[in-house]
Amino acid sequence: MTWRLAILAVLLAGFPGAVSAQGTIERLYVLDCGHGRAADMSRWTPGLNVGTPFDVRDNCYLIRHARGWMMWDTGIPEAVARMPDGLVAAGGAMVWKRPRTIAEQLGQVGVAAADIKLVAVSHTHPDHVGNVGMFPAATVLIQKAEYDWAFGPTRSFPFSADIAARKLEGDHDVFGDGSVRILSAPGHTPGHQVLLVRMAATGYVLLSGDAVHFRDNWENRRVPSMNTSKEQTLASLQRIADVLKELKAELWINHDRVQSEQMKRPPRFYD
Ligand SMILES: [Zn+2]
């Protein structure tokens, strides 16, 4: 390496969104992982929309990379599909239904749960980790801060502690080629993370987890009352905004009903 390249490498390494390699994933499938209804939207918009009902969607994302299959988040438990009245959650604040199962959608793609070797979760709330146990061959990618919080003495285990987990401390380039990157984005929970994927035709997409729940909250930087840190949330939202701008990335907001209803669904995919 010449001294000019060495200086360039040092400069790029310090750049917040620097991507060392320009890999792409082969396919991204958006799975329907639950439909939720809340009686009072103000839980997500403090001081606004008091008593207004609120519909959310819950998505899971299946990624095909040349080196294997990966899931991002796992949604509401599959068993909810068999509950006609749905599952009451969040202390009565939400009712979840599961019109379609993951198993059914994996079938449409022709993938077995045992083929999926990596499961990354944005955080450990039940609508994101409800089916971690259906991927027995997988290693779970989770922030150490999230794991220690969720499996701590004061909280019930969100999934079996016997499941192999790789505890991350900050950002992580999953396949080492820049195509799938976990970015630390705490605030909704102590170890919340988001996922940045790169596709040949679609370009960069940032999958929000619950860093933000819907478009209007994103545009107005509103912080839901259940978040563990308002300050961290606002810093994470700024970080996401910087990444979107720098990489011309699209933000896909997991729980946004309007955006979710526009998504291609299996067997269709993004590439
Ligand atoms: Zn959620």
Image: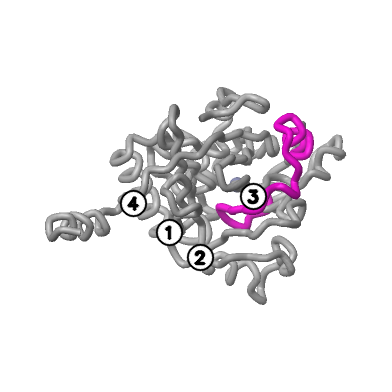
| Residue matched to label 2 | 168
Hey, which residue is sitting farthest front in the picture?
1
Label pair 2/1, CB-CB below 8 angstroms:
yes
Query: In x, y percent, where is residue 108?
Result: 74, 29
Which is nearer the N-term, disc 2 or disc 3? 3
Which is nearer the N-term, disc 4 or disc 3? 4
* Ligand 1 has an atom within 8 Å of the beta carbon of the residue at disc 4: no
Marks 4 and 3, Cα distance to the nearest angstrom? 30 Å
Is residue 183 rendered to the left or right of residue 73?
Answer: left
Q: Amino acid at mark 4?
A: Ser
| Residue matched to label 4 | 20
Display colour scheme: one colour
Secondary element at image label 4: loop
Q: Amino acid at mark 1?
A: Asp
Secondary element at image label 3: helix
Q: Residue at x 39, y 53 (%)?
A: 236
Secondary element at image label 2: strand
| Residue matched to label 3 | 128
Q: Which residues are magenta?
A: 101-127
| Residue matched to label 1 | 171
Which is nearer the N-term, disc 4 or disc 2? 4
Marks 3 and 1, Cα distance to the nearest angstrom? 19 Å
Query: In x, y percent, where is residue 151?
Result: 65, 70
Q: Residue at x 74, y 65 (%)?
A: 160
Using the image, determine if residue 160 lies above or below residue 212.
below
* Ligand 1 has an atom within 8 Å of the beta carbon of the residue at disc 3: yes
Q: Residue at x 67, y 47 (%)?
A: 74
Q: Amino acid at mark 2?
A: Leu
Q: Residues within 10 Å of mark 2 (few under 14, many from 20)?
A: some
Using the image, determine if residue 94 lies above or below residue 13.
above
Which is nearer the N-term, disc 4 or disc 1? 4
